[in-house]
Amino acid sequence: MRERSFPSAWAPPYFRPVFHLTGRMLLALAAAMLLPAGVDAFTGDPDWRAFLIGSVITFACAITLMHVTRCRLSGGLTLRQAFLLTPVAWTTIALFGAIPLYISDYAQLRDHFTNAFFESVSGLTTTGATVIVGLDDAPKGILLWRALLQWLGGIGIIGVAISILPALGVGGMQLFRTESSDRSEKVMPRVREIATGIMLIYTALTVACALAYWLVAMTPFDAVAHALTTVSTAGFSTSDISMARWDNPALHWIATLFMLSGAVPFVLYLRLVQGQRDALRDSQVWFLVTLLAALIIAVAAWLILMAGHSVAEALRLSAFNVVSVVTTTGYATADYTLWGNLMVGLFFGLMFVGGCTGSTSGGMKIFRFQVMIRMLQSQFLRLLYPRGVFPRVYAGRLLPDDVIGSVVVFFSLYFICYSALTVALMAFDLDFLTSASAAVSALSNIGPGLGPIIGPAGNFAELPNASKWLLCFGMLLGRLELFTLLILFFPQFWRG
């Protein structure tokens, strides 16, 4: 049968695969909305209608979009199509994810599209910044939906980091190019074999985390909601005071372990399951673990000497909050801004770091810091020994020039974006600490910032609406590794 043509205004033929794939993702989102609808219906909360209506609207739009953009995907995506897919898909899913929040009966979100969209973007990008006050009394459906958005965003960014970003060579990601991502003429990730395995591992970790939470202290609902946001290193909680609501040392150590599990490359888990023991020697993982161990000991020593905490309590507080910030989860068991100016400065610096590539963590990623260290080391040695030859090696391999260039450019662009975002936020009459920490919180997808307004004990509800939209852009920019979104603003991209 001859394929029916549609007006190009609906979907230019060149970009039809992008919108078609986005429609498929919206179908999954529509199905996910039925879960909080069922929870609200079971608990007798009227918000079940909002989620059902949101699901119907999303389903209808998804089917329509897939219908008007139907095409053959066997040929794969070109580089331009792949660059377009990630920002279009992420923005569209965040937009539809906000619908049930916007039409719900919950006063802080109903008819307040800025707040609804901010919460949806924060969830999908696994940032964890919230505008909701009174989470302890919020409807269970809304709490579950926030957690589900973060869980979906976590597995989504793993897929992008494995299949699309290495092929595009974004920020040095080509260092992790595998057989599943080829930067030739086409970009259609052939990762079905590993995608299924990673999804199963991701789900298994989430289930294990939920069971551990439930067995130790939490109710079944709180356990599931927090498991969804722990493994995804996202940080949404069902309480205004986050994990501090449960004063249980065992629970905090469990959370620390599973936050760290989400910051590790998920391909590593798959390799371990397949019996590849060399995966345990992963350079990123060892660097991350070593860094965390040193930081935890240093912060614990400070708490023992300056605050008089016991050794066990100091180690627990230090480990939980350091791992939470470095893995960009954003949970808190204490307001670490009250630990002294040195700790404020330390945690501010840690907000830039992030976890490993191929994990759910945000931030600048461990491997980029490793590459920069190798480059600096090589440069200093050249100054000492001008005639010497000092190869730049990463994980036993010589670093290609394109990787080095990409990492340097990424660092430069990151701090340019960070500076611009900080200044722009200050234009809304926000103080420097709030603006600077909100900017890095958005770009690194951490969640809480620093200071009395958006610190670990605060939230983003009091910020001006315009600044919330700016932070939404920042969250998407950071989650999509800067280039994937900013390249759309170049006229040359649209000229082909």
Image (cartoon, rainbow, N blue to C red):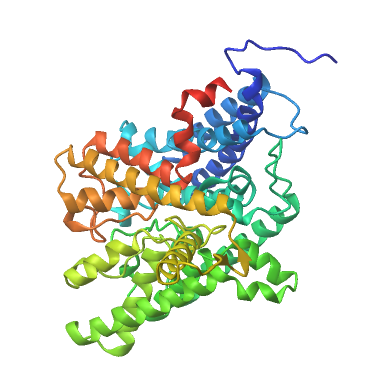
Quadrant position of residue 333: bottom left
Quadrant location, the N terminus: top right
The vertical placement of 287 against 81, above or below, is below
Which residue reaches farthest right?
A: 1
Across and down, in percent, residue 74 comes to: 78, 33
Q: Residue at x 42, y 40 (%)?
A: 47
Across and down, in percent, residue 194 comes to: 71, 56
Q: Nearer the viewer, residue 495 or 328?
A: 495
Q: How many marks?
A: 0
Q: Nearer the viewer, residue 479 or 187?
A: 187
Which residue reaches farthest bottom?
A: 311
Quadrant location, the C terminus: top right
Q: Residue at x 22, y 48 (%)?
A: 435
The answer to whether residue 5 is visible is yes
Q: Residue at x 73, y 24 (%)?
A: 71
Across and down, in percent, residue 410 comes to: 44, 48
The answer to whether residue 214 is visible is no
Quadrant position of residue 447: bottom left
Q: Nearer the viewer, residue 39 or 108?
A: 108
The vertical placement of 466 against 355, above or below, is above
The vertical placement of 440 against 495, above or below, is below
Across and down, in percent, residue 434 comes to: 20, 51
Left or right of 262, for residue 123: left
Left or right of 295, for residue 276: right
